[in-house]
Amino acid sequence: MKANLVFILILVFIFFGYQDADAQRRRGKSKKPKSAKVVQTPPNVSYTVSMSKPWTHLLEVEMVMNWPQMPKKAEVKMPVWTPGSYLIREYARHVQDFVALDANGNALDWRKTSKNTWQIDTNGAKAIRIGYYVYSNDLTVRTNELNYEHAFFTPAALLMYPKGQLKAPSTIRVRPYRNWKVATGLPPVAGQANTFKAENYDVLYDSPFEVSDFKELKFTVRGKPHRYVVTGDGNYDLQQIADDTAKMIEECYKLFGELPYDDYTFILNTRGGGGLEHLNSTALQWNRFGFEPESRYTAFLSLVAHEFFHLWNVKRIRPDALGPFDYENENYTKLLWVAEGTTSYYEGVLMRRAGLVNANYILDAKASIAGRLYRQPGRFQTSLEEASFDAWIKSYRPDENSVNRQISYYSKGELVNFLLDILIRTNSAGAKSLDDVMRLLNDEFYKKGKNFTPADFQDAAEKMAGTSLDGFFKKYVSGKEEIDYNQILNQIGLQFVSLLPESDKGYLGGNLSESNGRLRLTSVPANTPAYENGLNADDEILAIDGFRASRRFLTFYLGSKKSGDKVKLSVFRHDKLMELDVTLGKTPASGYKIVPVENPTEEQKRLYRQYLDEDLG
Ligand SMILES: [Zn+2]
């Protein structure tokens, strides 16, 4: 194959260059007496990532492994997932044109021994060079993309590791296309252009790369350098973004008392969506015209706050199973409701403290989550701990039944952390808060090199509350009881109310989507009239009582009916016309809000002000 031949020639050329340098090093050291003892050393691994033809979407990887203890059959492996995104993604499926050479440029035999393992006959070689391409045409924060505009890559989705050697250090050299620049959170190797080092694979795989003609804006917070690296057009004001980000970083500094990194890089692509947390960087993706209006910009800042807070919560304050990582299997934990839920909760907290949103922003967001949770029968089926544990098979694979079986450890986690913070504040008469829990976990676990367990988290929360919170955790964390909001909110002068109480208006239930004039059921929550009367997800609703159904008309028509009335629905199911008789139910309460209680006490006012820095009411 042509690609293979060219690739081998490139490898041979670079390999001999490398060998010369290596030989010089060896000659320089030759005067030292040889030790009789064979020291077990990790392999010396260096990667070169090239992108000579961006339009092919093929990132070219060269991996040189020098190893005195090189096995006769060396195995290299591609991770199957990347930390922070709890799904087996099978990165090996994008690998092609694998080759392996010895020091003389001779091709070595190899074979695949599993979906992500390449086994090489090393024939006594102590240095081998491996080459392969990775097809990279998927812009998400946990995959790779190479095209005319840039290369974004996630090392876990690109770089193989030697089996059993995840503690080995490595270097990675990037050969950019044309005038492109290279940005990553990894420290540079002095004197070598575009070359970076990682002390182990957890660090290497933690550090995404952006290679493009990016815009860069540097700023300093508490003496530490930070920068935004942005690829893509958009209606953003980078200086404004940096200024607002700096305010949130300052709030994190106040919370933890330090910024535990040498420098921090925000990689922003103005396509795609989402973010992924890292130790001293983050990958952010946001729609290029999604920085206006203000509500969209606030949502972007919320993402920034989330990923930045993660540098403590999950990257350093680590749940039991989340680091050091197993890159070949699922890493199970019951604590994603803390890793993600607590982090989601702190988005609003940091933005409020930074003066970027008001108190109502936080309260409205929580009421909205609570309202959505009421429409999910799955809240009685799956606890936060169960949702965390099963993230690998459920969270990233939602389907039409999710509404009936699952909850999100993000959103319910955010809600439960909100309530937990208030519980700690009110039980400690304002002396402690969830901040103190995070600080304790940082000091007693991260700083002491330990991961924390569910029991450790509960202990920390109880220590700060000064009382047992077992009931709270049993009901809302390991259990799946309906949340009693007012029992907790009232103590800080708030109440959870519905502006639209349950009514006798006709109600169908069922979640709808409408596109190109087609009205379709996307899911059918249990115990709704739609569910009980036999409607299915994917049914296309054509008419109600013989009248053409649009979403708007359906809402109007149902509003004119009463609970107990019967309607006839005409639907296409599997492209077959069907008629269904449906008895309508009562319209459930909606329009949830969190508002001040009437006549709050001085203590309620004090606690509220301390919490949200605004007067109650
Ligand atoms: Zn997150």
Image (cartoon, rainbow, N blue to C red):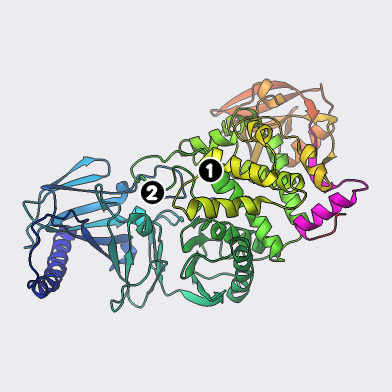
Q: Nearer the viewer, residue 405 or 427?
A: 427
Placement of 540 over or under 131, stated as above or below: above
Q: Residue at x 78, y 49 (%)?
A: 429
Res 456 label: none
Q: Is residue 147 visible?
A: yes
User: Residue 257's x, y, as percent?
Assistant: 59, 64
Find the distance from the CA under tag 1 to the CA under tag 2: 16 Å
What segment is highlighted magenta in the picture? Answer: 588-613
Q: In which quadrant will I find the C terminus? A: bottom right
User: Residue 274's x, y, as percent?
Assistant: 53, 55
Q: In which quadrant will I find the N terminus? A: bottom left
Residue 474: quadrant of the picture: top right
Q: Amino acid at mark 2?
A: Pro
The reply, left or right, for residue 540 in relation to residue 318 is: right
**Tag 1 residue:** 336
Question: Residue 596 magenta-drawn?
Answer: yes
Q: Residue at x 46, y 55 (%)?
A: 140
Does any atom of ligand 1 lie closer than 8 Å to the CB of label 2? no
**Tag 2 residue:** 324
Label 2 environment density (alpha carbons within 10 Å; few <14, some 14–19, many ≥20): some
